[in-house]
Amino acid sequence: MTTIALHDVAKRYGDVTALAGIDLEVESGEVFGFLGPNGAGKSTTIDILLRYTYPSSGRVEVLGHDVTSDPVAVRERTGILPEGYAPFETMTGRQHLEYAIAANDADDDPDVLLERVDVAHAADRKAIGYSKGMTQRLGLAMALVGEPELLILDEPSTGLDPHGVRLMRQIVREERDRGATVFFSSHILEQVEAVADRVGILRQGSLIAVDTIDGLRSANEGDGELVVELETADGVRERVAGGETAAGSNPPAGAQVGLEPVVAAVDSLAGVSAVRRDGDALVVACATEAKLDVLDTIREQGATIIDFSTAETSLEELFVSYTEGGR
Ligand SMILES: Nc1ncnc2c1ncn2[C@@H]1O[C@H](COP(=O)(O)OP(=O)(O)OP(=O)(O)O)[C@@H](O)[C@H]1O
């Protein structure tokens, strides 16, 4: 059964296209990680799923309801941890849960929920005085009230310490095990990998990949990381300015050429998906068969290679390779 279905959903704010028309289906009982860099459109999508905002075009169904015409039916069955959850000024942690339990007509025990997110020790304190991580835990407890069929968590790990991050993951798994669907956004692939059955990667308002993490990795198969340590950029500049470049182009003496031409030349090679500078090293994401070409090109550009090493694509690199060059 499908819990979330987006059909060609677009959202524009004036000149800004926050979502460019996305299609997505999330199945019941799935943990779905929604990934993307800052400004990619994650919160906008979540706001549309809950009809906090209208899509400019497209159709959105959640738990079998058309969100535009029937938002209340969706919200009643959905636990929500909004981005930047903020508690009420006057209420204690326990009172927040009592309020949410009454509003949802649920029969949860507030103390059990506070215990579950490890904030029971502060149950009688005003929640406005909670730390960032405690507030986030309280927000999660509020989302869990009434055993919702769907949990929508916007950047749930924000402000959490490593124990909190682990607890969040554990709770997501427990919720999935009792049959809930979990849809959560993040820009940290490592956090998503540990719990998500599938991930969707959003970039500049477009969904550019939907797959398991293993699937994403094999789609990038062959792409590893080549780290090439070079003599300093100044060293390159001096040699190139002195006409020692082996590239055949003879820049005039005194030309200010740094590593940029080297980066550009490597970036234009077949099999290279990304190049970035890390101090005086170039970090090149490329297919195995392109590695020799990369080293040759760097030399041809007049740079001196001090050392190089290769590594498998890290999760961070995987994320960057999907999302580089834009929001
Ligand atoms: N109310 C608004 N008015 C104008 N532009 C908006 C509004 N809300 C979002 N946007 C724009 O839409 C784009 C997507 O924003 P959104 O908040 O959905 O990104 P995000 O992926 O959640 O980012 P982050 O990881 O930083 O939270 C951005 O360019 C943002 O500036």
Image: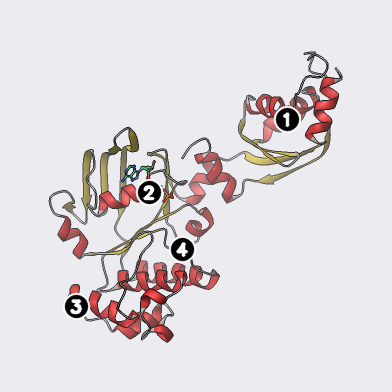
Task: State the residue position of label 1.
Answer: 259
* SS at badge 4: loop
Q: Is mark 2 within 8 Å of ligand 1?
A: yes
Q: Nearer the viewer, residue 84 or 179?
A: 84
Secondary structure at numbered mark 2: helix
Mark 4 belongs to which amino acid? Ser
Pick whichever, 147 or 44, lies toward us: 44
Residue type of the residue flagged with mark 1:
Leu
Mark 3 and mark 1: span between their CA atoms?
A: 63 Å
**Residue type beneath disc 2:** Lys
The mark nearer the N terminus, 2 or 4, is 2
Whether residue 4 is visible, yes or no, is no
Which amino acid, by three-letter code, is at mark 3?
Ala
Q: Is mark 3 within 8 Å of ligand 1?
A: no
Q: CA distance from mark 3 to mark 4?
A: 27 Å
> What distance separates the C-alpha of mark 4 from that of mark 1?
37 Å
* Residue ID for mark 3: 102
Residue with the mark numbered 2? 42
* Residue 63 coordinates in the image, percent (x, y): 21, 57
Callout 3: 10 Å neighbours few (<14), some, many (20+)?
few
Q: First in sequence: mark 3 or mark 2?
A: 2
Of callouts 3 and 4, the N-terminal one: 3
Quadrant including the N terminus: bottom left
Work out whether 220 lies above or below 142.
above
Tell me the crowding category of disc 4: few under 14, some 14 to 19, or many 20 or more residues within 10 angstroms, Cα based: many
